[in-house]
Structures are given as C-alpha cells and as structure tokens.
C-alpha cells in the first residue's frame, strides 16, 4: 500500500540515491562503504540545521546498487536519447545521476508506474535545477520509458 509516509520515504531515498551516486562518481567510493556512510550519517540524519527525511533504506540500496551494477547498460540507453552531438560527458554530473536513477527504475523496477518514476525524478531535478532542466529530465526519461516498458 502506498501511504503518504511511504511515498515521502521513497522520495527521500531517490534524492539520497542521486547524492550517493554523485559521490560515487566523483570519489569512486566503494559500494559497501558508500551505502554504510549513507545509512550511518545521511538517511534521516540532522546535518547542520537540516533534518533529512527518513528514507526507505531498502529502496535506496536497490537504486544505488542497481545503477552501479547496470551502469553500462543504463548509459547506453541514455546516450541513445540525447540530442545528436551530445554525450553523457557533457551533462552536469548531478543531472547524469538523476537520469541514471530514473532510467534504472524504468528498466528494473516494473513495480513502479512509469508516471511515478518520471515525476519523482523531475521533482529531484527541481531540487538542483531550474524548470528547463526539469523538462529535460522529463523528456529523456519519457523516451527511455517508451523503449523499456510495454
């Protein structure tokens, strides 16, 4: 059952997954260490004056682990959705992680409706970017969904 609390916990897990994957991308932190760090110090924690929302830990772990395990496949799918002449290397590093997480959910989590996955990552994009970039996330993930979902 999808309660408001579970929905908020999943949203928090998605935002944390993007942050964890950004750290993984920039620092090459080992997966076990990365997950442990987020479990111990980020998910549901109070950092400075910010109280982080409690995240659904299993969902967070699945998204982070899944993106890392399937990165080549995800990146190939995403590359095919970018405008001609664009590569993943040209994307902002945070934007790349948002797209990877969204693509992973669309590819591997058939239990999550397409509309939910896309709108959740559009919301994550709004946490970091303006409307233009959020629309970009919507467009790319919509194109991915058309390929990977029936």
Image: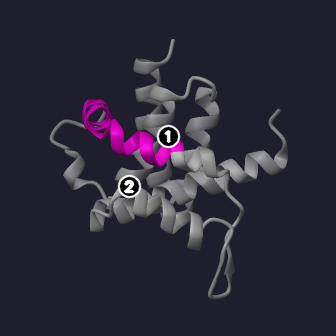
Q: Is residue 76 visible?
A: yes
Q: Which residues are magenta?
A: 62-80
* Residue 21 vs residue 118, the one in the foreground: 21
Distance Cα–Cα, label 2 vs label 1: 28 Å
Residue 71, relative to residue 12: is it above or below?
above
Could you say which quadrant of the image residue 77 lies in?
A: top left
The chosen color scheme is: one colour
Q: Which corner quadrant holds the N terminus?
A: top right
Q: SS class of the residue under badge 1?
A: helix
At which x and y percent is residue 87?
19, 45
Q: Which residue is mark 2?
A: 31
Q: Is residue 69 magenta?
A: yes
At which x and y percent is residue 53?
71, 65
Label 2 packing within 10 angstroms: few (<14), some (14-19), many (20+): some
Q: Which residue is mark 1?
A: 138
Chief secondary structure of the magenta portion: helix
At which x and y percent is residue 35?
48, 59
């Amino acid at each position: 059952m999808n309660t408001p609390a579970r929905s908020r916990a999943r949203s928090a897990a998605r935002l944390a997954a993007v942050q964890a994957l950004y750290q993984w991308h920039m620092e090459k932190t080992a997966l076990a260490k990365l997950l442990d760090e987020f479990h111990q110090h980020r998910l549901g924690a109070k950092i400075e004056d910010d109280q982080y929302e409690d995240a659904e830990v299993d969902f967070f772990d699945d998204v982070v682990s899944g993106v890392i395990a399937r990165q080549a496949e995800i990146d190939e799918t995403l590359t095919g959705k970018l405008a001609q002449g664009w590569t993943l290397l040209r994307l902002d590093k945070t934007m790349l992680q948002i797209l990877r997480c969204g693509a992973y959910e669309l590819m591997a989590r058939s239990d999550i409706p397409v509309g939910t996955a896309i709108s959740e990552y559009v919301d994550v994009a709004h946490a970091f970017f303006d409307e233009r970039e959020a629309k970009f996330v919507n467009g790319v993930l919509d194109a991915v969904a058309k390929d990977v979902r029936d």
